Image: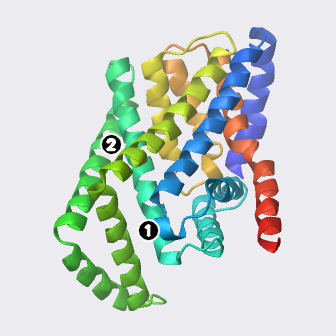
Amino acid sequence: MLALEYVAVDLLTGARQSWTSAAAAAPFALILALAFEALSYGSYSGLTHALLPEESRPTYPTVLAIDVTGNGFSHVVPGGGAVAAALRMRLLARAGVRPAKAVAAGAVEFAVTVLWFVAAFVIGLIAAVPLPETHPFLKTASILTVVLIVTFGGLVAVLIVRPDQLVTVTHALARRLPLVHPNAFERLVRAIISQVQLVLGNRALSRRTLLWGLGYWSFDAASLYLSVLAFGDAPNPGGLITTYALVGLIALLPITPGGLGLVEGVAVPVLVSFGTAHDAALLGVLTWRLFGFWLPIPVAGATYLWLRLRRLG
C-alpha cells in the first residue's frame, strides 16, 4: 500500500512537474523502447522454452502466452513472484509438462536470471568506475554480489560433485518438515539435479540458455536506456547498466508485486547519481515501468483467455 501511494502520489506528482520542464519526448525512441521491452519478454520465453524437456515441450507461442500471463498476474497480487510461479507451473502442467520437470526448469531459469543480473551489475561497475565516496551504497551491493556468486557457485558444485548426498540430505530434511512429502520432494530435487546436469553437459543447450538469458536483460536494459533518452538526456551506459541490474535484483525480492515502488524509488536517484538529469531519469523510469510493468497486466488477461479458449478448442 505504501509502495502504491509512493508511485501514485510522489512519483506521479513529480512527473507532472518534470513534464512541464522536460523536452518533448522523442516518439521514435519510445517506440524502440517498447519494441525492446517486447523482445525482452520474447527472450525470457525463449529461455523457458529451451529449458523445458523436449519430449513434452509446448510450442513457443504457448510458452510465451504462459509467461506473459504469469508475469502480468505477478504485478497485481501480493507475493507476486510466488503466485506467478505457481500459475505458470499449473499452466505448463495443463500443456503437458510434468510438474517436477516444470519446477526444475523454473528453478534453473531463475538461477540463470539472477546470475545474468549479477553479471550485468559487475559489467556496469567496471564501465562506470564509480568513486566510493560518491556511491557508497554500491559497496554494500558489491558485497552482496560476491555473496551471490559464491553461493550459486557452491550450489552448482554440490549438484555436480555430490548429487546423491544432496538428495539424501534434502530427503532427511523433508521428513522433518510439516506438510512436505519426502518422496515427492526427493523427486523434485532429482529433477533439478537432472536439469542442471543436462544444461551443463549439453553445449548447444548451454549456449541457448546463455544467449536467451543475455537477450532478456540486455533488451530490457536497452528499453530503459531509450526511455530515458527519449526525454532528452542520454544516461551514462555504465551507470544505467549498474542501476538496471540493481533494481532487477531488488524486484526479485518478495516485498511488493514486481518491485512496485521499490524499483522506481531506487532507479531514479541512482541514475541521477550517475549524472542523468532528474527530469529525464524520472520520466524515463516511469515510462520504462509503464512498458514493462503496467502494460503486461491487460495483455496477461488476453493471453490467459487465449490459453483457455485454445485448450477448450
Q: State which quadrant residue 227 falls in.
A: top right
What residue sits 32% from the left and 70% below the top? 193
Q: Where is residue 53 in the image (x, y as percent from the top left)?
A: 47, 66
Amino acid type, residue under disc 1 in the picture: Ala
Q: Where is residue 11 in the image (x, y as percent from the top left)?
A: 72, 31
What residue does disc 1 label?
A: 104
Image depth: mark 1 or mark 2 in front: 1
Left or right relative to 71: residue 147: left
Q: Where is residue 209 in the image (x, y as percent from the top left)?
A: 41, 48
Decide: is 264 above or below 25.
below
Identify the image quadrant of the C terminus: bottom right
Amino acid type, residue under disc 2 in the picture: Thr
Q: How crowded is mark 1: few (under 14 residues within 10 Å), some or many (20 or more)?
A: many
Spatial CA span between label 1 and label 2: 24 Å
Look at the image and tell me whether residue 133 can be seen.
Answer: no
> Which structural element holds mark 2?
helix
Query: Residue most toward the front?
Result: 55
Decide: is 175 above or below 223.
below
Q: Residue 145 carries which label?
A: 2
What residue sits 31% from the left and 55% below the top? 202
